[in-house]
Amino acid sequence: MDGVLVMPGNSKRQGATRKRQGGNPTAGSGGRRRRGLEGKGPTPKARDREGHKAHKSPKSADKKGGSGAGRRTGGRKPPSAEWVAGRNSVVEALQAGIPVTTMYVAEHTERDDRVREAFKLAAEQRLSMLEVSRHELDKLTDGAVHQGLVLKVPPYEYADPHDLVSSAQAAAEVPLIVMLDSVTDPRNLGAVVRSAAAFGAHGVVVPERRAAGMTASAWKTSAGAAVRVPVARATNLTRQLKEYQDSGLMVAGLDADGDVDVADLEIATSPMVLVVGSEGKGLSRLVRETCDVLVRIPITATTESLNAGVAAGVALYEISRLRSR
């Protein structure tokens, strides 16, 4: 079965292609197999090639306390790349516009319709392509069923939570931020990002720990909205909410026992943060106590709750409707 596997990898191979003795003309993607990867994109940079010393040097710099390019990690281990494995999953990821740095193809992989479609999409997007041994792909994906086709997805670059407000103010718009509390399904995160784009929110904030992040699955569920709506990470949600409040934003938490129907939310036209909890546990205690108002979505008695993606979509629609007045 085709599937998606997203996990960090750390290859120890010494080169980009398997080397053979005796000058075999079919080694790597050259010789008689050169036509097998028609439309191959540019050769990836050294820092993007697993096993190359340039790929490892940023990690060494971090350990030594050196100052490198990119956002600071605060001493924490930098995020690792993710892997999308399996022919159907690779094609779907490329069709969804997920940011990809490299496509890996196992040697002697049979060129069926899905593989040819993946090659076509990779060529159109000018992706780098590398042909490696199946053993190498097994190591990269930790033994996943990759079917000879794997994508490398770079770590997502999270925004700063305060930049979401400043960007809205720079555009002369009333800030609207969505915050997710303990939502662990990346598909729910992707759905929230999609709704945020549809109803004019300026960004989504998620916790750094024990919560869904912008994985390849979240990217795909967002249907391209992740390109337009920034996602930020906060170390502590309660502290971040208080900082938002100090900046003049009101905080509304979605809760089944809320005091106000979301359709009657008076603060909808004010700068605000909408907090959405998990389907099972709802809002955590400290986050709930920090909210200025708790709002509910009226549903029938036969339905216990809505998942985070659906609840956020309904609430954002109502807020957008109230603002349009």
Image: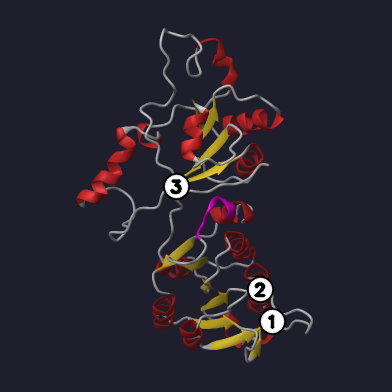
**What percent of the width, then of the height, locates residue 180?**
53, 71
Mark 3 crowdedness (10 Å alpha carbons): few <14, some 14-19, many ≥20: some
- Tell me the element at label 1: loop
How far apart are labels 3 and 2 at the CA level?
Answer: 31 Å
Q: Which residue is mark 3?
A: 8
**What percent of the width, then of the height, locates residue 108?**
58, 21
Q: What residue type is disc 1 on?
A: Ile
Q: Main secondary structure of the magenta part?
A: loop
Figure check: 321 above or below 292: above
Q: What residue type is disc 2 on?
A: Ala
**Which comes sooner in the sequence, label 1 or label 2?**
1
Front in this rendered view, residue 167 or 297: 297
Mark 2 crowdedness (10 Å alpha carbons): few <14, some 14-19, many ≥20: many
Q: Which residue is mark 2?
A: 311
Report the side of 85 relative to 71 (left or right).
right
Mark 1 in CB contact with mark 2 (< 8 angstroms): yes
Report the side of 63 relative to 321 (left or right).
left
Q: Which residue is mark 1?
A: 297
Q: Residue furthest bottom?
A: 259
Tell how many labels: 3
User: Which portion, as a residue range, is magenta?
Assistant: 213-217
**Which comes sooner in the sequence, label 3 or label 2?**
3
Q: Looking at the rendering, in which quadrant would you find the N terminus?
A: top right
Q: Residue at x 44, y 58 (%)?
A: 158
Front in this rendered view, residue 319 or 150: 150
Q: What residue type is disc 3 on?
A: Pro
Q: Residue at x 50, y 34 (%)?
A: 137
- Tell me the element at label 2: helix
Magenta highlight on residue 249: no
